[in-house]
């Protein structure tokens, strides 16, 4: 049985890879894009959770590091794309839908209309109960980190920083009402080399995530999957501060 799929995504560079990687194993009815949230609003929300100093450090990192890394990472990124057979062909325009927020009533109306078997979530805001309860189908999340240990942002990076390569990987899990605590369908490690850095990790992650998503879709269609418990006892991590990143680069050689 070929399942009906809806993809929910932020303006993420990897959604084309995901769409093209899945279109032959599922009927992707729509790809719903939400507008990016104002970064200043995100930073303000984060201050309440981790403090102004760390957020200031994250802003400095976001301003100075990613673009500099990207300039020197093009050959490695192209190598990963070729090796992993990632396809960046455009998503057909008739498949695209645009909403201000993934939790808008327009999104709920669309999903109720399509009645997908699976809603796959990639880099969006946290889903609210009204959306999660709108259909009988499954909501599953793409997480670039090995759960339950690495919740939140940049899970693969933090595993490397913690000298925990066995937990540098990706996870596909069901979504519940908390952050990264839903039951795990599949997870697996990604292998990095000395040429990889903060800007190339994502390409390794998305290749692994497409592989795991295919398994998840097939096993859900066959109603044949064994869930891995996700106890959620680990803290939520956020992006690195500028000084934290530089320390890990110079002292631990984690780029």
Image (spheres, helix red, strand yellow):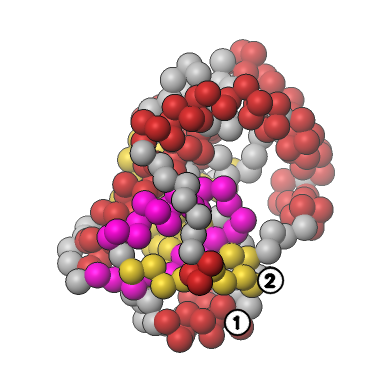
| Quarter of the image with the C terminus in it | top right
Residue in the foreground of this view, choosing between 74 and 101:
74
| Quarter of the image with the N terminus in it | bottom left
**Residue linked to disc 1:** 106
Residue drawn at x 61%, y 13% is 251
Residue drawn at x 64%, y 39% is 239
Mark 1 residue crowding within 10 angstroms, few (<14) / some (14–19) / many (20+) = some
Residue in the foreground of this view, choosing between 152 and 190:
190
Depicted 14 relative to depicted 141: above or below: above
Can you give x and y, in whole percent of width and height, for residue 22 in the image?
35, 56
Magenta residues? 2-25
Depicted 207 relative to depicted 133: above or below: above
Left or right, 188 with reference to 144? left
Residue drawn at x 53%, y 85% is 109
Residue drawn at x 58%, y 25% is 73
Q: Element under label 2?
A: loop
Query: Is residue 54 shown to the viewer in this render?
Result: no
Query: How far apart are the two marked residues, 2 and 1, measured between alpha carbons?
Result: 9 Å
Left or right, 4 with reference to 40? left
Pointer 2 or 1: first along the chain: 2
Residue in the foreground of this view, choosing between 163 and 30:
30
Left or right, 9 with reference to 181? right
Depicted 223 relative to depicted 201: above or below: below
Mark 2 residue crowding within 10 angstroms, few (<14) / some (14–19) / many (20+) = few
Can you give x and y, in whole percent of width and height, for residue 189 in the image?
35, 35
Depicted 59 relative to depicted 218: above or below: above
Residue in the foreground of this view, choosing between 10 and 227:
10
**Residue linked to disc 2:** 100
Can you give x and y, in whole percent of width and height, for residue 183 in the image?
36, 59
Query: Is residue 221 shown to the viewer in this render?
Result: yes
């Amino acid at each position: 049985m070929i399942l009906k799929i809806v993809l929910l995504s932020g303006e993420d560079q990897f959604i084309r890879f995901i769409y093209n990687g899945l279109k032959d194993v599922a009927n992707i009815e729509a790809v719903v894009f939400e507008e990016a949230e104002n970064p200043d609003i995100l930073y303000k929300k984060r201050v309440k959770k981790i403090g102004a100093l760390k957020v200031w450090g994250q802003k400095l990192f976001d301003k100075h590091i990613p673009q500099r890394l990207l300039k020197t990472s093009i050959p490695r990124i192209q190598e990963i794309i070729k090796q992993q057979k990632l396809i960046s062909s455009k998503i057909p325009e008739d498949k695209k839908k645009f909403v201000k927020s993934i939790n808008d009533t327009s999104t709920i109306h669309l999903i109720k209309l399509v009645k997908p078997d699976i809603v796959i979530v990639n880099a969006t805001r946290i889903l609210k109960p009204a959306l999660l309860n709108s259909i009988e189908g499954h909501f599953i999340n793409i997480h670039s980190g090995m759960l339950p240990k690495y919740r939140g942002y940049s899970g693969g990076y933090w595993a490397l920083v913690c000298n925990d390569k066995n937990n540098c990987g990706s996870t596909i899990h069901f979504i519940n009402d908390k952050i990264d605590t839903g039951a795990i369908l599949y997870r697996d490690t990604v292998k990095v080399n000395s040429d990889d850095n903060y800007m190339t990790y994502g390409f390794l992650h998305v290749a692994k995530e497409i592989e795991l998503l295919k398994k998840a879709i097939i096993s859900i269609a066959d109603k044949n999957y064994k869930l891995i418990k996700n106890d959620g006892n680990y803290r939520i991590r956020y992006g690195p501060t500028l000084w934290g990143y530089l320390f890990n680069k110079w002292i631990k050689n984690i780029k």
